[in-house]
Image (tube, helix red, strand yellow):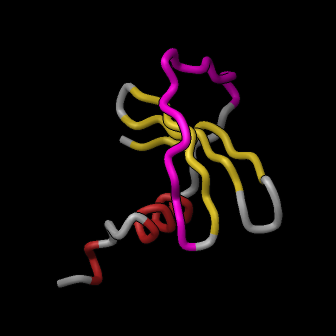
């Protein structure tokens, strides 16, 4: 299970995102056509209870950028 925990714009096309993947939290840098892991948290960051889950569009885009979009590769 992949869950978006937070996001911060760094500019018009670059951003940081914090994702939960299983039991790990990973800070990712996103720029056009590239996703780079920046840091794996040693201790999980506690999130406020009002956090909304990531949209399906974000998940689809993430999978496309990672080359994991298998539904079009039959």
In front: 1, or 25?
Answer: 25
**Lateral position of residue 25 relative to residue 1, left or right:** right
Q: Position of residue 17 (x, y in %)?
A: 62, 46
Overall secondary structure of the magenta stretch? Answer: loop
In front: 4, or 55?
Answer: 4
Q: Position of residue 67 (x, y in %)?
A: 35, 70
Among the 4 quarters of the image, the one containing residue 32: bottom right
Residue at 48% from the left image edge and 31% from the top image edge: 40
Asked if residue 8 lies in the magenta stretch, the reply is no
> Residue extending furthest right?
11
Residue at 50% from the left image edge and 36% from the top image edge: 26
Number of numbered callouts drawn: 0
> Residue extending furthest left?
74
In front: 68, or 53?
Answer: 68
Q: Position of residue 52 (x, y in %)?
A: 64, 40
Quadrant for the C terminus in the image: bottom left
Asked if residue 39 lies in the magenta stretch, the reply is yes
Residue 33, above or below 35: below
Q: Which residues are magenta?
A: 33-50
Residue at 36% from the left image edge and 41% from the top image edge: 1
Residue at 75% from the left image edge and 46% from the top image edge: 8
Residue 20, above or below 8: above
Q: Position of residue 60 (x, y in %)?
A: 46, 66
């Amino acid at each position: 299970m992949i869950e978006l925990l937070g996001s911060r714009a760094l500019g018009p096309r670059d951003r940081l995102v914090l994702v939960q993947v299983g039991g790990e939290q990973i800070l990712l840098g996103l720029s056009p056509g590239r996703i780079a892991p920046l840091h794996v948290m040693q201790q999980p960051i506690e999130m406020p209870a009002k956090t909304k889950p990531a949209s399906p569009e974000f998940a689809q885009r993430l999978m496309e950028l990672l080359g994991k979009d298998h539904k079009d590769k039959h």
